Structure formats: structure tokens, C-alpha cells
Amino acid sequence: MNLKENCCPKCESTEYIKSGFVKNRQRYKCKDCGYFFTVSKKGREIERKYVVKALQLYLEGVPYREIERIVGVSHVSVMNWVKKYNIPRLESDAYAPTYKVMNHSELLTYVINKENLKDTSSMITDLGDKFMVISWKTKK
């Protein structure tokens, strides 16, 4: 068996056998001490590009729940990444970011209209088959 990280939690022996299932998880029995244990559950691995995108949105001032809706990742995961990577809070509230999610044709129409880009700073980023436009206007 190739379960190096799964040694017996009681005696740390690597000599064990399969011993059925508990709640759809493989159960093992230690040959040395007779202790029963199960394999640690691995969580769903999230692709790094989604982590980076979520953290970028956080830095742009987008709320956690909105990041959840946009990227499709739990807001709790985003909060955990912010803590894990020690991302600081925005110190200044002098600008107000707004964002819109659009498909390709909507994006072209938006960019062609010069009024949409007047007196703002904007960033366009992709979200799979859609695009997000983040714009900043100074609060008055």
C-alpha cells in the first residue's frame, strides 16, 4: 500500500490492512496494535488562477460575497486566502470601484462608447468566457 502519510495515528506503524468503509471512506486496521482509522479527506483543489483572480478582486475593493458570485468560489475560501497570504486591507476609501461582467459583444459596445471611459481608470480582465470591467471614480 502506498499511504506513507497514513500511518497508524496510535502507534505510528505503517503495517495496516483495509478493513471496510465508514461513511464512504476507506477504513484501515493496524496490524501491530489493532487500532482502526480512516484516510484523511482531501478537499477539492482550486486552480491557482482562481485564487489569484479572487485576491485581485479583493484588492480592488470588491466584497467577499461578490467575489463568490463572480469567480464561483466560496467567500469563506476567499477570506482564508486573504489571511493565508497576509493581504492588507485597503487603507484609503478615496475611490469607489464599480464592476460589470460582460460577454464579448457587450464589451466591444462598452469600449466603443467613449463616455463609459471618461473620467475613470479602468481595467479589463477575463473570467472564463466573459470579461469584467473594473472602473474607479474618485468619491466626491
Image (tube, rainbow, N blue to C red):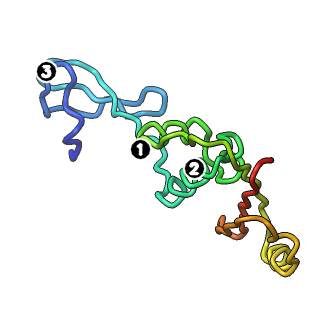
| Label 2: which secondary element | helix
Sequence-first disc among 1 and 3: 3
Crowd class of label 1 (few under 14; some 14 to 19; many from 20; radius 10 Å): few
User: In this rendering, would 36 be left or right of 46?
Assistant: left
Q: Nearer the viewer, residue 119 or 111?
A: 119
Spatial CA distance of label 3 from label 2 is 47 Å
Residue type marked 2: Leu
Sequence-first disc among 3 and 2: 3
Q: Which residue is mark 1?
A: 85
Q: Residue at the spot x=48%, y=33% of the render?
A: 24
Crowd class of label 3 (few under 14; some 14 to 19; many from 20; radius 10 Å): few
Picture quarter containing residue 6? Answer: top left
Return the mark for residue 11: 3
Q: Which residue is mark 2?
A: 59
Q: Nearer the viewer, residue 72 or 123?
A: 123
Spatial CA distance of label 2 from label 1 is 12 Å
Picture quarter containing residue 75? Answer: top right
Q: Residue at the spot x=66%, y=64% of the render?
A: 127
Sequence-first disc among 2 and 1: 2
Compared to 7, does 139 lie above or below? below
